[in-house]
């Protein structure tokens, strides 16, 4: 997970979905900003991972909004 986060062009915290499940766990987004904290959370609760994540070589992005996907794949 840390290898993926290291490639990510977005902040590590953006990988975490702050949805109803997140809130139901009574989590605080401020606690999940470092790569290590994000990785630990996503290993424990994989459904909180923002999707899709696209990886191309040594770069990765979160594919939201979807208009980010085509330029990333073309580049």
Image: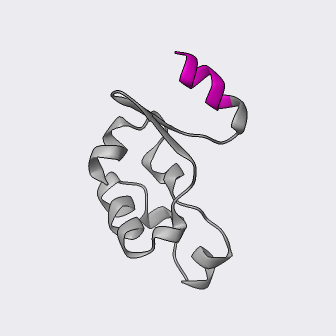
Q: Residue 40: where, in percent of width, then height?
A: 32, 67
Identify the coloring. Answer: one colour
Task: Name the quarter where the N terminus is drawn.
Answer: bottom left
Magenta-colored stretch includes residue 69: yes
Q: Residue 32: where, in percent of width, then height?
A: 43, 62
Number of marks present in the image shown: 0
Q: Residue 67: where, in percent of width, then height?
A: 72, 30
Magenta-colored stretch includes residue 6: no
Query: Is 44 rendered above or below residue 39?
Result: below
Q: Residue 74: where, in percent of width, then height?
A: 57, 17
Q: Please tell me which residue is depicted at 29% across the width and 58% down the height of the picture.
A: 36
Q: Is residue 28 left or right of residue 33?
A: right
Kindly report the secondary structure that dominates the magenta region of the rendered protein: helix
Q: Please tell me which residue is depicted at 56% across the width and 24% down the height of the picture.
A: 72
Q: Is residue 22 left or right of residue 7?
A: right
Query: Is 54 rendered above or below residue 32?
Result: above
| Residue 56 falls in image quadrant | top left
Q: Please tell me which residue is depicted at 63% across the width and 31% down the height of the picture.
A: 69
Query: Is 61 rendered above or below residue 73?
Result: below
Read off the magenta span. Answer: 68-75
Q: Please tell me which residue is depicted at 58% across the width and 74% down the height of the picture.
A: 22
Query: Is 21 rendered above or below residue 41?
Result: below
Depth order, front residue of 57/50: 57
Depth order, front residue of 37/58: 58
């Amino acid at each position: 997970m840390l290898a993926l986060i290291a490639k990510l062009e977005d902040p590590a915290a953006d990988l975490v979905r702050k949805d109803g499940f997140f809130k139901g766990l009574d989590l605080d987004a401020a606690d999940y900003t470092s790569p290590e904290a994000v990785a630990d959370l996503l290993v424990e609760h994989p459904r909180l991972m923002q999707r899709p994540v696209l990886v191309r070589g040594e770069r990765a992005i979160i594919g939201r909004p979807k208009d980010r996907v085509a330029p990333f794949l073309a580049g």
